[in-house]
Amino acid sequence: MSTDALPHVLREYALLADGERGAIVGPRGDLVWLCFPRWDDDAVFASLIGGAGAYVVAPVGRFIWGGHYEDGGLVWRSRWVTETGVVECREALALPTRRDRAVLLRRVIARSGPARVRVTLDARWDYGRRAATAFRRDAAGCWHLRSGAAHLHWGGATAARPASGGRGPLILELCLDEGGEHDLVLVIDTHADAGEIPDPGLAWSATAAEWERRIPPLHGIAARRDARHAVAVLSGLTSLGGGMVAAATTSLPERAQEGRNYDYRYVWIRDQCYAGQALARLGPHPLMDGAVALVRDRLLDDGPELRPAYTTGGAAIPDPRTLDLPGYPGGTDIVGNRVNRQFQLDTFGEALLLLAAADRHDRLDGAGWRAVEIAAAAIAGRAGDDDAGIWEIEPRRWTHSRLVCAAGLRAVAARRGAGAHSASWSALADALVAGCAATATHPSGRWQRAADDPRVDAALLLPALRGAVPADDPRTLATLRAVEAELTTDGYAYRYRPDARPLGEAEGAFLLCGFVMSLAVGQQGDAVGAARWFERNRAACGPPGLYSEEFDVEQRQLRGNLPQAFVHALLLECAAAQSR
């Protein structure tokens, strides 16, 4: 593996995304992850998890790295201070997007002093196993090559040369005077004849205009820049069909050498609902509409057999398998996910909460109300079944699942469209809460995880936030006190105690739970405490402002797949709550 493609700590990676796929870029200008044509398809660049293949744009010689996103989108600027000046690389996946075609834009800029930059294009289909073939440079100086099902067309690289024997990676040396710029355009297409390579100036203008259209100004909101960035991340992870993947990557370990490596390149119904509800706090938004349409259609198609997650195309997720790759250090190389065989009751409650939020904005049609009826009937029919719950573990009658379903039922029962169903849905919600009160109230007065599991769980803060029980219910207050006393440290929150080890040794702090703590403290009227929780967890990222699922408090490192959509969704919801 080239030294340019050696792995970095996760906090240093940036995301380029166009909704149908995402690219991960490191501090040495190393684009080390891109699946094509969709999120869960084979990787063309896979060195992030130990496969071959990368697309590197980096200065020659010694340099110091920095970088930032342009405000309101996923246009990233790598910035290197070299021994002769300052070099930048402006990069993005071009918009508007197409399912069958990705366009990578990279513009090298000599900000001060001369710049010498080395570019390497090493495309390898099937997670690095199939090298590119059919290298050809046309009369216009554009390179054309093929790697598996991907046809690559590279403009701006006329002077590039294959590294060895006409078949190796393409290498390009750029020398720019101060103020000089050079555009590289890489088109990855499912067709051999992809037409002309886009004009870089026009492609950049169209991309900037599309991001401006997608990201609302959010004037007056707390942490405005980060809130807008959260919307950009959620938008970048959302496909044309409205499905938002949970993360752009697979197999990045939550804990080194513990086997907790998962493929998150799929659409989780729960995560989709979290994002839709957060966006609904800001007012109607196309991403909210897309979330509503996706959840509605899945309920209409699958009813009580609703799966926890799907591909962006609405298909079933494949079973897990390994790729025989080294993996990211500390992890393995999993594709597919075992969630495809789980039942998660709380997804029906979250679906109802999302659909009710859409109706509050007058965005729920007749088909949406049919989906509401299906979800409510599914809760009535399956509330007694064991389920895998929010944390996707062994099946039990988890308290959180039933209380969130009660919250969803209360939310839709309060809407005018509920009609004659309102009384029965409210009664079902009352029955669910009463059942949990009878079997899952801890002797201390708080909620416990399940009838046969007395532990406290940070997820049990959500039912009061979503309206299952009042904010001043004694169980709400006791649960908040217990979570803060038993599951938090140094301003970060953990899910639950999986074993007797101290917090932080079994797993990292769960950033979702940290933002939930902010909302829960704020619900009790403690604005200062809510702000402290918000700011502490908002800081748990690297320079690109991306969040993973877990945060290693001691080492201040991100853990798990990147970027984790539901963390950005809860950051956005917290920002809206802070503004109020």
Image: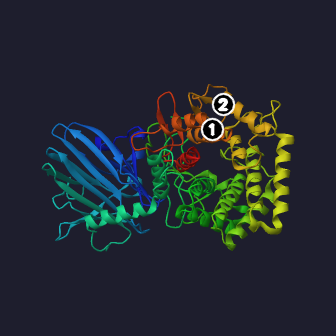
- Residue type of the residue flagged with mark 1: Met
Residue at x 66% of width, y 72% of height = 365
Can residue 135 be seen in the rendering of this structure? yes
> In x, y percent, where is residue 495?
64, 37
Residue at x 49% of width, y 40% of height = 331
Which comes before the other along the chain, label 2 or label 1? 2
Disc number for residue 252? none
Above or below: residue 367 compared with residue 111: below
- Depth check, front residue: 449 or 528: 528
- Depth check, front residue: 469 or 506: 469
**Which quadrant holds residue 114?**
top left
Within 10 angstroms of label 1, few (less than 14), some, or many (20 or more) residues? many
Q: Is residue 460 left or right of residue 569?
A: right
Residue at x 60% of width, y 33% of height = 529
Q: Which residue is mark 2?
A: 484
- Depth check, front residue: 187 or 280: 280
> In x, y percent, where is residue 33?
39, 51
Distance between mark 2 and mark 1 Cα atoms: 8 Å
Q: Which residue is mark 1?
A: 517
> In x, y percent, where is residue 169?
25, 54
- Residue type of the residue flagged with mark 2: Glu
Can residue 2 be seen in the rendering of this structure? no
Q: Secondary structure at mark 2?
A: helix
**Which quadrant holds residue 195?**
bottom left
Confirm or deny contact between disc 2 and disc 1 (CB under 8 A).
yes
Q: Secondary structure at mark 1?
A: helix
Q: Quadrant of the N terminus?
A: top left
